[in-house]
Amino acid sequence: MRVRDLLTPGAPRLRLLAAEEELDRQVTGVMTTDLQDPSRYLHGGELVITGMLWRTAPVDSERFVRTLVAGGAVALAAGAAEVGPIPDDLIEACRRHRMPLLAVPDDMAFATLTEYVGRQVSADRAADLAALVDRHRQLVSAAGGGGLDAVLQLLGGDLDLDCWVLSPTGRVIAGPAEHLGAADRDQLVRAHLAAQRQRRRPPHRAQSATGTYSLLPAPADPEAPAPLADWLLAVAGDITEWTAKRQQLAENLAGLVAAERTRRDEDRRLRRRLADEILALLQRDADPAETSRTLHASAVMAGYPSSAANSPTPEETWLVLSAEGVGLPEGAVRAVLEEALTDTADRALVAGNGTGAVVVLPAPEEPVPADALRDLLAPLEAGLGSAGRITVGVSAPAQAAGALRGALEEARHARRIAASRVGRVCVAGPEALASHVLLLAAVPDEVRRAFRSRLLDKVIGYDLEHQADLVRTLEAFLRSDGSWTRCAAQLHVHVNTLRYRIGRIEELTGRDLSRLEDRVDFYLALELA
């Protein structure tokens, strides 16, 4: 913003009184003062606004203007509402020192002028930073520069522009994580994924408990966006209400984020190829010693830290994950797991193409329950759509690389159990392998349907015709271990009513619910349903 911009149509109604030749000076700030010596508050580039209360004699004007010049002020705006018309001595002092002097109308509050200049200066600074971000994006694209945290810190410090780069599961990739809680991140990524699935045009506006945010996708490949794996830029505030220059800043920043993601994907190409080689060895049941050597060599080639604390070794304990997607593009599950399981060590090897993926990673010191992994992936539900599913199985820790083949089979069995559960994101751990659920998961679909139908169809049909609530009664009876009193209390019915319902179930099915064998059959049929 230049001084002459304050005199254009649409600007505050200021009138020029002196130093017309200096109107091309750039305004970088604004300050209101009536101090006789405001020099300590001047940093250069300010429009100084004053009510002239400092003037008690003509000589004060010369002293005041000289102070402004020494402090680097670029213009003076004087209001006459308090002390009367702007005196000639002030006009002459401004002419001598080539200081543009602007008269503020009596009916204009200084706050109005201050806010106007502040908005214009902020927009100019945003434009400058937008150009900076654009240049940085080009550098990242060309040379693999990175540095997202530094750019976000710059924008936050200079423009109060709070931004975060998030993964689709809510992991903070860049930005001040302490200022965006887990609940907020969960809401934001779910809103982003839902908007992407519905093909809404960005930016997407999202509301969380702490305020309004604007969400911008940052696809690694704009021609083939992958919402379940691509990063997103979350900006505090509604950017659609911002000036065009400030909006451009946010859009350029999203481009920088996309470039950084592309660079990261390029870095991972070798690791993906090595992960595929490891999976091929496991699938052909290669010699454990060969698998161990290849795994260790692959880890080194993939760029893992070489320190003893981080570098994988053949004797390390490993976990294997097996995952499958339904209704998702090829490669989506692999990309999803790469993003979800990345941490500061970044030691996961993710293999696979098509609709599935296999992950091999060093086991953490503390066991990771299947429910915790399920919670980690839960935000992805918003982007799956009605037909989409992701199922994951987790092995028990494999003691050394030679045991990975067995861990892979275990993870695949666990994944089949996860697939038998209800939900769009389901995870099963090794504990499920000691359950009847493992046997049910291996039963062919036609056998499952026949078994379920033979036991439950008549009961379900009776419920549909008479609203007798027999299925719910049967479930409660089995959960109560056959206790008439506890089951009746749970259903809020009299024991005699419960006995009548159980008797009706036995008549319809020809089974005896006092026998353990029949109770087990009913329990399994309900599980299959």
Image: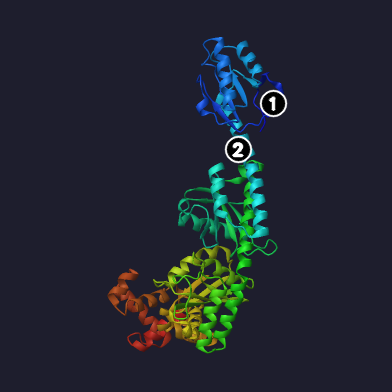
Q: Residue at x 56, y 81 (%)?
A: 278
Residue 85, x across and y down, in percent: 60, 12
Pointer 1 residue = 23
Q: Could you tell me residue 9's position as x and y percent?
A: 71, 27
Which of 428 and 94 lies nearest the eye of the viewer?
94
Residue 423 visible? The answer is no
**How far across and how far down the image is residue 65, in percent?**
58, 19
Tell me which label, 2 or 1, sits earlier in the chain.
1
- The residue under label 2 is 122
User: Is residue 215 shown left or right of residue 3?
Assistant: left
Can residue 410 be seen here? The reply is yes
The image shows residue 526, relative to residue 157, as above or below, that is below
Residue 164 sits above or below residue 334 on the image: above
Q: Is residue 23 above or below residue 393?
A: above
Q: Position of residue 306 (x, y in %)?
A: 50, 71
Marks 2/1 in contact by CB < 8 Å: the verdict is no
- Rendering colour mode: rainbow
Q: Quadrant of the N terminus?
A: top right
Identify which residue, 521 or 498, lies in the foreground: 521
**Front residue (pair 142, 236):** 142
Q: Disc 1 residue type? A: Leu
Q: Residues within 10 Å of mark 2 (few under 14, many from 20)?
A: some
- Within 10 angstroms of label 1, few (less than 14), some, or many (20 or more) residues? many
Report the amino acid beneath label 2: Ser
Measured Cα–Cα span from mark 2 to mark 1? 20 Å
Query: Quick one: SS at disc 2?
Result: helix
